[in-house]
Image: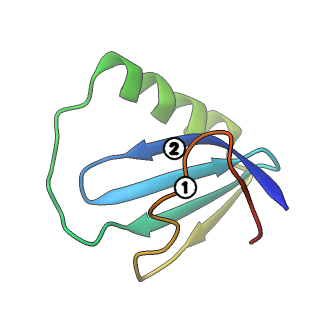
Amino acid sequence: MAKVKVCLNTGCTKYILLDDGRCVETPLAKCAPTVWSDKDSAKWHTIVRETTQAVKVNMPVLQDVKEGDTIKL
């Protein structure tokens, strides 16, 4: 079990940083590019700095998880 530390929706991809250093990169069901806010940029820097293992998924999964949730991966 791992706790979700950071979630970032970039419009086409969702990044989910877990407290154990893994980062899940999953496509969204529908792509809708967005402009990043300062808060989104800060989340991205946290993801880049703290990711120790990337898990890339080629289908939409974990779409409803949010920061603070506990998931089994």
Residue at x-position 34% and y-position 17%: 38
In the image: residue 54, left or right of residue 63? right
Which residue is more in the foreground, 52 or 4? 4
Q: Where does residue 60 sit, x and y in percent of width and height?
A: 40, 76
* Disc 1 target residue: 65
The amino acid marked with disc number 1 is Val
Label 2: how many Cα within 10 Å (few below 14, some 14–19, many 20+): many
Q: Tell me if mark 1 has few (under 14), some (14-19) or many (20+) residues whose alpha carbon lies within 10 angstroms of its own.
A: few
Q: Is residue 24 depicted above or below 68 in this figure? A: below
Residue type beneath disc 2: Cys
Write the residue at 25% across / 30% down. 36
> From the image, which quarter does the C terminus lie in?
bottom right
Above or below, 39 against 19 in this view is above
- Front-lying residue, 53 or 37: 37
Side (left or right) of 12 relative to 71 = left
Disc 1 versus disc 2: distance between alpha carbons? Answer: 8 Å
Q: Residue at x 35, y 59 (%)?
A: 13
Residue 44 horizontal/vertical position (percent): 47, 35
As drawn, the label of residue 20 is: none
Q: Is residue 43 rendered to the left or right of residue 70?
A: left
Q: Secondary structure at mark 1?
A: loop
Q: Please state which of the two labelled residues, at mark 1 or mark 2, is closer to the viewer.
A: 1
Q: Residue furthest top?
A: 38
Residue 70, percent from left and from top: 75, 54
Reading the image, the residue beneath label 2 is 7
In terms of image quadrants, where is residue 19? top right
Please report whichever mark, 1 or 2, sits nearer to the chain's N-terminal start.
2
The percent position of residue 10, horizontal first and vertical second, equals 31, 47
Type of colouring: rainbow
Question: Looking at the picture, does residue 54 appear above or below residue 70?
Answer: below
Report if the CB atoms under discs 1 and 2 are less than 8 Å apart: yes
